[in-house]
Image: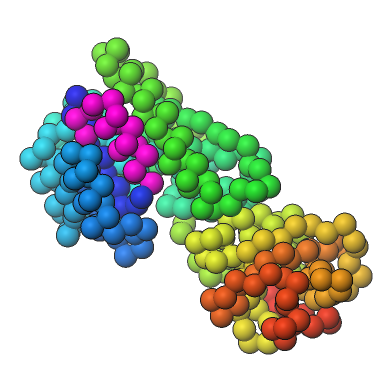
Amino acid sequence: MKIGIVSNSKICIPLLSYLNSIKAGVMLYFGRSAHTDISVSELTVFCRMNNIAFYAEDDKKEFYNWQQLNEPDVIFITGYAHKIAVDKLGGVPKGIFNIHFGKLPQYRGPSPVFWQLKNGEAQLGLAIHQLTDKLDSGEVAWEQSIKNEEYHNYNYINQAFSQLQVQGVSQILTQLSNRPTPIYKMQDEAEARYYKMPKLADVIINWDRMDAKEITALVKACTSWNNGASTLINGYELKILDAEAASAEANNIPGTINIANNKFNVACINNQMLSINFFNINSTCIPARHAGFYGLKTGQKFISKI
């Protein structure tokens, strides 16, 4: 079976390594993206060392020519920036599948890991579904979830899911080999929700509305792709990389700083207190116990509006 992998991210590497290890006929189509996390040269070397056919995209239109020229029996897409016109992909006998790092249909859209973490979901989902013309709406062929742990953050979950996707692809390939027509699960459109790419307003802490739990969830969702959750003080942007709810109660206006005993705490709503452990300012990562050396003082207040 010839297997085509389409990606614009290093999350494809565990999947390529697995398929190569089982002697599958695997080929990679690497999509062009302004935000890719791996270079073409790095992937070229990896594929050459593992005898994997490799093609680097210059224009998204090339994808259809690549498919028609190479005629993969099945295609798995794991991170790709462009919408694919399914009707232009003729002759993929085993199907075209999208690997979506989010629970479906509740977390459709381009950045499901961020939104699942920001919303504080107890379980973080991953799904592999058939590709259709409607974004993330095809029948689900495989799904899995993991517990949202305190130590999880955006980068960790992307790495974990890049490993977990291998299990899903393996099971789908087994089904395709053993069953003439595998049965997949229809998505419930009544539960469908689409989330856009996060914007500035989505990554900024609103001290007047968010409690300590919501803020820590946002910090996890923003670390480390955004260098933490953003907040503003004295005209500067500070990004919180690690924080936790403090046991002490807050008696100040939300957003008010309290620095004492090497602790950098900030008042939240509902008389809660947030303990900040690490932050980023001016592209420098700083332990919060050194906040005073950077001009942060007790009584100062973070602002909630841009």
Q: Is residue 68 magenta?
A: no
Residue at left offset 73%, top offset 66%: 276
Toward the viewer: 85 or 228? Answer: 228
Which quarter of the figure has residue 255?
bottom right
In this rendering, is residue 218 above or below 100? below
In this rendering, is residue 235 above or below 32? below
Furthest residue to the left?
Answer: 69
Residue 52 % position (x, y): 20, 39
* Colour logic: rainbow
* 276 with respect to 84 (left or right): right
* 3 with respect to 99 (left or right): left
* 127 with respect to 87 (left or right): right
Q: Is residue 205 visible?
A: no
Furthest residue to the front?
Answer: 49
Toward the viewer: 280 or 117? Answer: 280
Residue 10 % position (x, y): 36, 50
Q: Is residue 13 magenta?
A: yes
Q: Is residue 53 visible?
A: yes
Residue at left offset 82%, top offset 71%: 262
Residue at left offset 53%, top offset 61%: 224
In this rendering, is residue 141 above or below 191? above
Residue 182 % position (x, y): 33, 18
Quadrant of the frame with the C terminus:
bottom right
Residue at left offset 33%, top offset 32%: 18
Q: Tell me the chief SS of the magenta region.
A: helix
Quadrant of the frame with the N terminus:
top left
| Image: magenta residue range | 11-27
Residue 49 % position (x, y): 22, 43
